[in-house]
Image: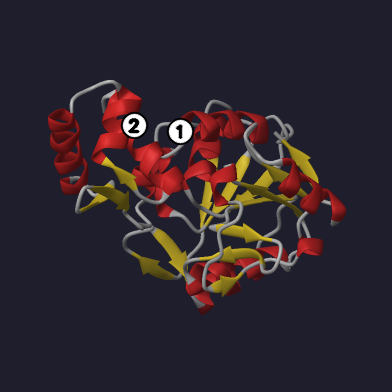
Amino acid sequence: MQQRHTDIINLVNEKGRASVGEMSNKLGVSEVTIRHDLNKLEKEGFIRRVHGGATPHNTDNVSHRITVNYEHKRKMAICAASLVEHGETVMIEGGSANALLAKELGKRSDVTIITPSSYIAHLMKETDVKIIVLGGLYQHESESMVGTLTRLCIKHTHFTKAFLGIDGLHPNTGFTSRNMMRADVGVAILEKGAQNIVITDSSKFGQVHNTPLYQFDQVDMVITDEDASLEYVNLLEKHNIKVVK
């Protein structure tokens, strides 16, 4: 993917809606070029074309979501991987930032990853990392397992750290998710009482989605990016959550 296409995806996701003229001015190319780019990116499922511009494509496709704020997510993944000790067994719940964490851990051979994400398991196929994939009902777009069987599998596994994702964080609602079934899996993971670490870029701060996720007192740490506002850092720290950025 061209850097300009990545920049367009980031701009659209950050603003919620971006006009062709705005993208043309910001990226220093003609409006004709931007329109061609938008047509290509919509065809590939990264954005949605609207009159005069584009809006985000609300997709659970992990490959697509990884491209949004990629550099932030890569740095967060490196930070999270540094917390995993030799011989440790960790749960990686799913999502784009967590997929990049798995890739970082794939450079090692001294850890065990438990995950409901077949996408993450597939990333690990050329590595020496031990992978335990949870069973359950397969969600096609997110490539993740959900449902009663997944909860049962979580109940019968043991891990010392859990890395989780979110779709939104707001002072009035706390952590929220766009998907009720995956939210249920996240709640089951938190019930195990491991060290619970949320990895999320700061674009999720201020967003509210339909399904409640975690209570503030269930989360031990949030790994985010350097653009995280002081307002949200203070909110998390007020609830005794360590913020790393």
Q: Which of marks 2 and 1 is nearer the N terminus?
A: 2
Seen in the image, is 147 located left or right of residue 152?
Answer: left
Instruction: Say what amino acid the circle numbered 2 marks.
Output: Thr
Q: Which residue is drawn at 53% across and 58% down?
A: 167
Residue closest to the eye, 170 or 180: 170
Question: What kind of colouring is applied to the model shown?
Answer: secondary structure
Name the residue at the bottom extreme. 148
Q: Residue at x 62, y 34 (%)?
A: 227
Assess disc 2: are there few (<14), some (14-19) or many (≥20) residues with their C-alpha within 10 Å of its C-alpha: some
Residue 139 spot, x, y in % from top left = 37, 66
Q: In this orientation, which residue lies closer to the viewer: 108 or 54?
A: 54
Helix, strand or loop at label 1? It is helix
Q: Quadrant of residue 217?
A: bottom right
Can residue 129 be spotted in the picture? no
| Residue 243 position (above or below residue 213) | above
Q: What residue type is labelled 1?
A: Tyr
Q: Where is residue 176 in the image (x, y as percent from the top left)?
A: 59, 65
Name the residue beneath numbered marker 2: 6
Query: Answer yes or no: do the residues labelled 2 and 1 have beta carbons within 8 Å?
Result: yes
Quarter assignment of residue 79? top right
> Which part of the image, by quadrant, shows the C terminus?
top right
Secondary structure under badge 2? helix
Height in image: 79 above or below 98? above
Q: In which quarter of the image is residue 75?
A: top right
Q: Name the residue under label 1.
A: 70
Instruction: Tell whether 3 sits left or right of 179.
Output: left
